[in-house]
Amino acid sequence: MRIRSSRSAGKAQGAKQDVIVCVDDEEVVLSSLRRQLREACPEHAVKVARSGEDALELLAELHAAGRAVPLLITDQLMPNMTGDELIERVAGQYPQTYQMMLTGQASPASIGRAVNTGRLFRFLSKPWMLEDLSLTVHAALAAHRKDRTVEAQARELEDAYERSLAFVPQEYLKVLERPRLVDIERGDATGVRMSIMFADIRRFTTLVEAMDPQQSFDFVNRYFLRTEGAIQDNGGFVDHYQRDGTMALFPGDAGDALRGAITFSRAVDAFNGERREAGEEEIDIGIGIHCGDVIAGVYGGRDRLQCSVIGDAVNLAARVEGFSSLYETRLVVTESFLDELGSDHGLSLRRLETVRAKGKQKPVTVFEVLDALPEARRERRQSTLADFQAGTVSLVEGDVPAALGSFARVVAADPSDRAARRMLDHAITQLESGAGGSGVTVLTEKAW
């Protein structure tokens, strides 16, 4: 039993060893090489072939089995395929394998061809000296090990670089016109026009109160994994995540941002479907989009740098996302974003208010995009859209009683319509105060 176990262990160990392949049409040469190499290189397996064709077949089998072949030792004069021809073939198919020519009849032309077309490490004449063979083989194996180490290090560096791009979006390299991440320096900046999107989970703090820290991390990671593709697939990229929030940038057409936001909302609907099946509470989100001129660049201290965009358009986009919570809707956009989008956008919109956020001087008119709502909510909003639009027109024109009637009908048909309730309250306030027209709503608290 012990003997069988030892042999099995030996076979298992041999299956893991790298292989030296010897090719010669003389059995006595192969026998001698096999014996000497096993003594000189016991950590390597030795396989033999009697022709170039057999050698290529053997190499294919070893490659398929995942066995590395650091060295091929071949004769020159063999039937059908000469050594230099074999070396050329091996170099093309297995470029990591070094080659040695061991022959007494190689011409300068054949050696030159092996050097030029293959990866010939050394040439030894027959008959060979055991010491020369051992030294040459060990040198070739050491060179191969060094190659593998260098390749492994190169792969690690490449992997590290690829991972670094998850922290610094490579789209910033394009915006800043830098070919590599290492070319970016503090202070690099350029002006660019972009659509900026913010998205946030509603009532996130309440949602995670019942979760432990690990569950909270798992939850937000599932959410981000579900929604990130909506941004990337529509020409945008994630600038950063902040707790439960996403900031995304769309450097191209404004339509990219619109499609990205609607697709993002659909991804949340799918995510909610998974949560329902798992018996988990559904989530809701708010999205805001604005378009404007920003400065994209690199800023930070001595040891910590960050790529991002800075500008009033970024601040306004964040506030617009906050406006969505006032109306309990999915997607709110600015009038200037719609202007950038063009008149043929085909969206189903509800004009909300002209608002001025705390700390801002200029008012902004915001619109609700019904296309981003879940289907049931979208259908309810569509059924009352005519009355809602009539109410906003009446407010703008100063016909407060007409606006009051329009919004009252919307609320009666759909009591869950937070935006209609808010507009109805505005109409009541204006009717009681005798003010005419909607004017500008001043938000006394920051919305984001």
Image: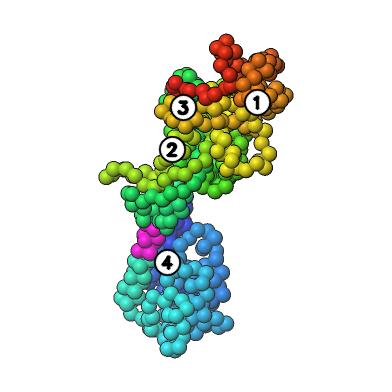
How far is disc 2 from disc 3 in space, using C-alphas?
Answer: 12 Å
How far is disc 4 from disc 2 in space, using C-alphas?
Answer: 61 Å
Image x and y of residue 335, in percent: 57, 35
Image x and y of residue 308, in percent: 41, 43
Q: Which residues are magenta?
A: 145-154
Q: Which residue is mark 2?
A: 312
Q: Which residue is mark 4?
A: 70
Question: Is disc 1 surrounded by few (<14), some (14 to 19) or many (20+) residues within 10 Å?
Answer: some
Q: Which residue is mark 1?
A: 393
Is any part of residue 215 visible from this angle?
no
Report helix, strand or loop for mark 2: helix
Please name the residue shown 47% across and 32% down the image: 362
Q: Nearer the viewer, mark 3 or mark 4?
A: 3
Q: Position of 220 compared to 415: left or right?
A: left
Q: Nearer the viewer, residue 279 or 183?
A: 183
Disc 3, disc 4: CB below 8 Å? no
Q: Nearer the viewer, residue 209 or 241?
A: 241
How far is disc 3 from disc 1 in space, using C-alphas?
Answer: 22 Å
Quarter of the image holding residue 435?
A: top right
**Does the magenta run of residues contain 153?**
yes
**Magenta stretch, main secondary structure class:** helix
